[in-house]
Image (cartoon, rainbow, N blue to C red):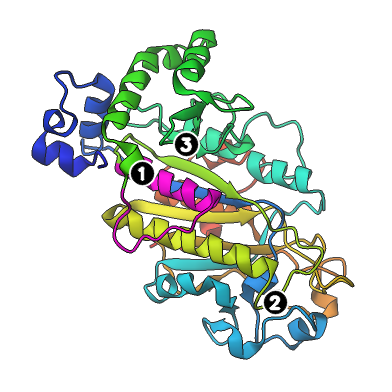
Amino acid sequence: MSITRRAFMKGGAMAVVGTAAIPSFLTRAAWGAVAPGASNKRLVVIFQRGAADGLNIVVPHAEHAYYAMRPSINIPRQQVIDLNGFFGLHPSLSSFKPLWNQDHLAIVHAAGSPDTTRSHFDAQDYMESGTPGVKATTDGWLNRTVQSQPYPVDSPFRAVALGTSLPRILSGKAAAVAVSNVNGFGVSGGNPAAAPLGNTFEAMYAQSVDTVLHSTATETFEAVKMLKSADPRHYTPAPGANYPKGRFGDALQQTAQLIKSNLGVQIAFTDIGGWDHHVNEGAVEGQLSNVLREFSQSIASFWTDLGALAEDTVVVTMSEFGRTARENGNRGTDHGHANVMFILGGPVRGGRVYGRWPGLEPSQLNEGRDLALTTDFRRVLGEAVSRHLGNDHLNSVFPGFDNSPREFLRYLG
């Protein structure tokens, strides 16, 4: 069973965990979640590593040029899941259509990093640091989000990544942890490989000179014991949350589990690979179709699993860059420029495609080969950080970028 706020308030922590002592951390987390001025709002960021093909993900099926440039890998118009008469979803994204119909899912097309690199490494680094073109940035924009905003719930799980090591996006001065497996309690505090929980935390806190980390070390151990008492190995997702098997589905299920355990999670991150399709990308079926099915079913299950907590949660997806508008000689696509971002959440004004569509005619393409960029990814993320999390320090989160609220897309209600 999960430790939820309702369980704490209705039955009392003693009844839930069956222990004589309530850890001070969890007492604060449980009551802090409903204390005056406390924030229940959460941001979940998903990175599609490998450069996803946005043009075959959200298809501009009314564009003649799209079909002309992709004779063997296009999505036939009659098989596209139509959204608004111009754009439609790849058929393997059928799990997203109900979310779109319910106005919880929004799309930003022709979005991404203004830097024109075609290097996976550099592009991912720039999007995780939040400073395109600047290699000297030492921390990630999600970590700066934590640094720049006080949080009413004293929780070492405020910022968490589901993976074996702390990603670039969460690296920095603020405390953040990487959880490789909630069930096995493999947790990493930035080490390249996950280690058993006790050893990792002991090393993390013993070697740190950060007094905040030192002050929460004992309470972190207590929190983990509390989570263990909730028997996470036998966690049951909400009815209808049918996560597909695989690393990404597991990561999102465990993200939901951590959120529902009321451990004070505000920011969560995970990623999914398998998007670099230079050869035999496929169309309705094939490599892209397979990863899209896993991607969309996992996210839709995560949304269902959160239940009422989804109303205060925003999920944003991103990829380092898109693919070329034209297919290559191997029935695949090469490294491109602009891409598509999905935004899902309770406060999202969904059922809309945001951003300016630049067109796919030869004169409209970036460098004559890619979808041109019309929305900087920082504009999309800045709105989530500012309007959802209530963090107005966007100059600190995205230094060097004029992220004026006047320029937001207004995808949040």
Residue denoted by label 3: 181
Q: In the image shown, does 372 or 121 lie closer to the viewer? A: 121
Q: Residue at x 72, y 62 (%)?
A: 322
Q: In the image shown, does 35 or 156 lie closer to the viewer? A: 156
Of the residues shown, which amino acid type is indicated by label 3? Asn
Specify whether 380 is left or right of 376. left
The kind of secondary structure element at disc 1 is helix
The numbered mark, 3 or 1, whose residue comes first in the sequence reads 3
Of the residues shown, which amino acid type is indicated by label 2? Ala
The kind of secondary structure element at disc 2 is loop
Q: Residue at x 29, y 36 (%)?
A: 231
Residue denoted by label 1: 257
The numbered mark, 2 or 3, whose residue comes first in the sequence reads 3
Whether residue 403 is visible, yes or no, is no
The kind of secondary structure element at disc 3 is strand
Q: Which mark is residue 101?
A: none
Above or below 125: residue 99: below
Whether residue 138 is visible, yes or no, is yes
Which region of the structure is painted magenta? 236-260
Q: Are marks 3 and 1 in contact (CB under 8 Å)?
A: no
Spatial CA distance of label 3 from label 1 is 11 Å
Spatial CA distance of label 1 from label 2 is 34 Å
The location of residue 168, given as percent across then percent down, is 63, 35
Above or below 111: residue 92: below
The location of residue 178, given as percent across then percent down, is 51, 32
Q: Are marks 1 and 2 in contact (CB under 8 Å)?
A: no
Q: Residue at x 54, y 42 (%)?
A: 394
